Image (cartoon, coloured by chain):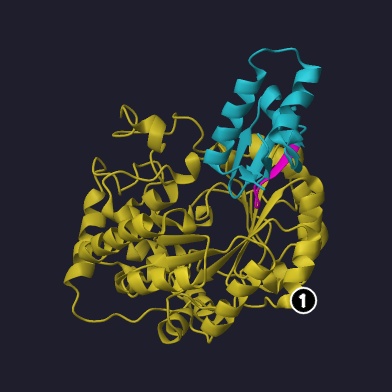
Amino acid sequence: MQACYAIAPGHRMQWEETRQGWVILYPEGMVALNDSAAETLRCCDGRTPLHAVVADLQSRYADSELENDVCALIAAALQDGWLRRR
Amino acid sequence: MLAELTYSCPLQCPYCSNPLQLGKRTQELSTDDWLRVLGEARALGAAQLGLSGGEPLLRRDLEVIVAEARRLGYYTNLLTSGMGMDEARIAALRDAGLDHIQISFQADAAELNNRLAGSDSFRHKQRVARLVKAYDYPMVLNVVMHRHNLDRTREILDMAAALEADYLELANTQYYGWALLNRDYLLPTREQLEDAEALVQDYRRRLGERMKIYFVVPDYFENRPKPCMDGWGRVFLGIAPDGSALPCHAAASLPGLELPNVREHGIDWIWHESPAFNRFRGEDWMQAPCADCEERAGCFGGCHCQAWLLSGDACAADPVCSRSPAHEVVVQAVQRAAASRVEPHPLMRNTRNSAQLQNRTGDLQKETG
């Protein structure tokens, strides 16, 4: 939980007006993010440790499952190569 | 969206998929045309932009195009031979916001690389590959594979590893344009392909995540066609140097298909309304064996351009499919190449040969099919 994460090099997260949603772009591909995934990944700025990301999200959304959900998302994003540990 | 900025190229690779009629530089779209097209396609939801050619670095306005693409929110990918790249240029492109660079190699060593490219380019490509890495881009190498370099697969893999490439794409030749003209020269044997694929598996195991290796199989050696462009008019929009909008890279070869031009129409009309982009949308065009085939939703009938080039009917099943009545054409081409003892000479892709081809009567692409 001390580790910091950021969007991986060669990837870019941005708002897509035509889709009204956040996406991650990479060479010849794109993944559409749901609202909670987008909110979490926007906090992954490469400087904020994961525990602080969780605390920040918990302060805004009361959800007992939040920490588990965040960890599952981070694991999946690392696996798919969108996210890098700093 | 794929922007083919120019068909000019310092290389003369005989496997080039560009059309035989390369056109003149004076017919190319202006900077303003490209900027307008980028804006129109982005408004429709296009997010990926491939910058290709020919050699896109020959366009002096490449940095302007990249900067506008980035401002609009495209993910930009430069597909280059490396010729025309130096440190000043890569710095300018990075400042303009270029996201990604892919460099082509023809082979692992200077002599073969330069012979295939018809130009003394190998050492420069190596320098550019290192430059790409120095500027914090992932190093993506692309090598088009065929009879004359498949036996060098091990050395090509070693070269990519030595350069510390992040990705290596070994893309077997697709037989369109110049490649179709030179098919007897380029078609490999099945053994060559199997050996190369085994080596790729071996290197994948050994290198793991250090270098990702893609091996794009040639469709002539398959029993089912590729889902060309993921379906006609579904996700792909190509723009040729002269502004023709292409539903498939090779669509200019299709007879009776009037390609809309961005000089005369907006991208919205071209994508939604133009007869060309609607020509093979859906399944109404299908005939036997595609019409009632249970796999039609996966392959979309394959490639219409290939169907036309090999069978003379753009609505036929792609002859790569073993269910196609014209499949024998593909089988025979492969057999002929394997049995060939005489080494055919390639026709190099350049403006002189392009002009000579234009002067010859008849449809040359059809003849070779």
Rendered location of residue A34, percent (x, y): 66, 24
Residue B194 lies in magenta, yes or no? no
Of the pair B51 and B163, the residue shown nearer to us: B163
- Taking B198 as reference, is A29 above or below it? above
Q: In the figure, residue B271 lies in which quadrant? A: top right
- Taking B10 as reference, is B146 above or below it? above
In the rendered image of this protein, which colour is used for chain A? cyan
Residue at mark 1: chain: B
Which amino acid type is marked by label 1?
Ala
Q: Residue at x 20, y 68 (%)?
A: B338
Q: Is residue B150 left or right of residue B65?
A: left
- Taking B109 as reference, is B141 above or below it? above
- Taking A29 as reference, is B5 above or below it? below
Rendered location of residue B70, percent (x, y): 77, 52
Rendered location of residue B96, percent (x, y): 80, 61
Q: In the figure, residue A47 lies in which quadrant? A: top right
Residue A13 lies in magenta, yes or no? yes
Q: In the figure, residue B88 lies in which quadrant? A: bottom right
Rendered location of residue B265, percent (x, y): 74, 45
What stretch of residues is rendered in magenta? Answer: A8-14
Of the pair B151 and B72, the residue shown nearer to us: B151
In the rendered image of this protein, which colour is used for chain B? yellow
Mark 1 nearby-residue class (10 Å; few <14, some 14–19, many ≥20): few
